[in-house]
């Protein structure tokens, strides 16, 4: 008994300590800040994932797995769908929805999902007209994905997602195709569940933009030997460079410190490497209480911290006067309530609060149905 407890707490310590250690061991300096487009692809899918941060990829076993780790779609309890809304910064909003349909005795699963971000009717200002031109513009960024996942054994699952990205920025637009790939290894250690995952997100084609926003009238050059230059400008169009998608590689590990029939307490951590930043890490925890008072109702509480170097200013070299906001950026917490019948029906409502540093706090809500 003592050995089992020692194993559990040793692993818990490693979960909280190995990730920063792995980060420090990296020597490659990835400084590709601002080199990617379609950043909305990083906003998440549901409130559970927002509260647990990037380590959630290790335990994703609901509809949200379609986004966080395709392999988790094969671990869902049954068919289900989920809708979410994210009140993001500057009065913008991100919405997400997904459906999972298991088949072949729940050894395989198929899912479709969609995420959209944007805002509308924003005034246009120019140097010549600093008070506004009277015109407005809108932004609408959308992805649509389809996922296939399969359990290859009682301990290993894998999944693949193909998705189309559509990016409408005012009168300019672009599109791309990307894939997500994920695996999930699940076993027991000391009699308690342990899960390890590998994911690769947003690996795909580059985005180039076109549209009337890039049109330009170029004055005609003078012609040697011709005294009069035509006054009508020459129509043309700016050419834009291709932009990468925000590809992210991630490994995550989760372990259940408590694994009883009505109570579960999980610790998790992850290491991630984005293509447009230096390496990051995160750790989180989730406690779930099922069938409270034999009523079928349950509750969960969650918290996490995620570190991305692109979001942290070195206050030793730059005194912003906002050290509290900088230090707390990456903190998230939340919880959920759910009701589950002895059969397969389940309904749940989840909430997450994610702190964005000097940009303030954001709120994520999700509604989940399972059958």
Image (spheres, rainbow, N blue to C red):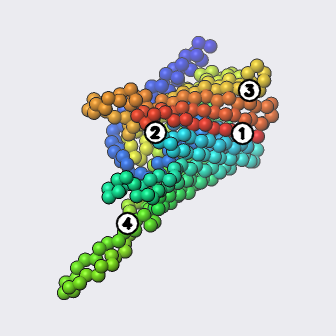
Contact (CB < 8 A) between labels 1 and 3?
Answer: no
Q: Which mark is residue 369?
A: 1
- Of the numbered discs in the image, which one, if any, rests on residue 272? 2
Q: 132 or 179: which is nearer to us?
A: 132
Left or right: 185 in relation to 289: left
**Mark 4 in CB contact with mark 3 (< 8 angstroms):** no
Of the pair 341 and 210, the residue shown nearer to us: 210
Identity of the residue drawn at 73% across and 43% down: 79
Residue 190, image x and y in percent? 61, 22
Image side of residue 71 versus residue 339, left or right: left
> What is the CA distance from the residue labelled 1 to the residue labelled 3?
14 Å
One can see residue 88 in this view: yes
Q: Which residue is mark 3?
A: 297
Q: Residue furthest bottom?
A: 225
Say which element carries label 4.
Answer: loop
Label 3's element?
A: strand
The spot of residue 55 in percent (x, y) is 53, 34
Residue drawn where x is 36% and y is 46% of the image:
33
Image height of 158 relative to 357, above or below: below
Disc 2 to disc 4, C-alpha distance:
33 Å
- Residue 298 screen position, x and y as percent: 70, 26
Evaluate if marks 3 and 2 touch, with contact meaning CB atoms under 8 Å apart: no
Number of numbered discs: 4
Of callouts 3 and 2, the N-terminal one = 2
* Residue 239: mark: 4
Mark 4 vs mark 3: which is more N-terminal? Answer: 4
């Amino acid at each position: 008994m003592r050995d089992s407890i020692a194993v559990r707490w040793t692993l818990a310590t490693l979960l909280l300590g190995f990730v920063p250690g792995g980060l420090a061991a990296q020597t490659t300096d990835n400084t590709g800040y601002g080199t990617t487009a379609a950043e909305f692809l990083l906003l998440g899918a549901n409130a559970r994932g927002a509260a647990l941060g990037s380590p959630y990829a290790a335990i994703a076993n609901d509809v949200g797995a379609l986004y966080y780790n395709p392999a988790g779609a094969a671990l869902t309890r049954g068919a289900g769908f989920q809708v979410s809304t994210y009140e993001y910064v500057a009065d913008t909003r991100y919405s997400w929805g997904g459906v999972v349909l298991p088949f072949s005795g729940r050894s395989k699963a198929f899912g479709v999902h969609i995420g959209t971000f944007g805002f509308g009717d924003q005034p246009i200002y120019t140097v010549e007209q600093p008070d506004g031109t009277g015109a407005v513009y809108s932004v609408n960024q959308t992805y649509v994905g389809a996922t296939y996942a399969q359990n290859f054994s009682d301990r290993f699952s894998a999944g693949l997602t193909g998705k189309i990205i559509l990016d409408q920025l005012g009168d300019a637009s672009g599109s791309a195709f990307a894939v997500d790939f994920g695996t999930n290894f699940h076993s027991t250690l000391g009699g308690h569940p342990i899960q390890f995952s590998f994911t690769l997100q947003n690996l795909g084609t580059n985005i180039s933009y076109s549209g009337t926003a890039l049109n330009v009238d170029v004055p005609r050059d003078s012609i040697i030997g011709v005294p009069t230059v035509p006054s009508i400008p020459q129509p043309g169009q700016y050419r834009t460079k291709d932009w990468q998608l925000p590809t992210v590689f991630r490994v995550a590990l989760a372990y259940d410190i408590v694994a009883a029939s009505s109570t579960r307490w999980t610790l998790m951590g992850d290491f991630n490497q984005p293509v447009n930043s230096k390496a990051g890490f995160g750790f989180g925890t989730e406690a779930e209480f099922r069938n409270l008072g034999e009523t079928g109702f349950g509750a969960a509480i969650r918290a996490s911290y995620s570190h991305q170097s692109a979001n942290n200013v070195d206050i030793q070299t730059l005194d912003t006067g906002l050290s509290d906001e900088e230090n707390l950026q990456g903190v998230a917490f939340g919880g959920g309530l759910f009701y589950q019948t002895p059969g397969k029906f389940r309904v749940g409502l989840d909430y997450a609060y994610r702190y964005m540093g000097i940009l303030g706090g954001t709120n994520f809500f999700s509604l989940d149905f399972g059958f």
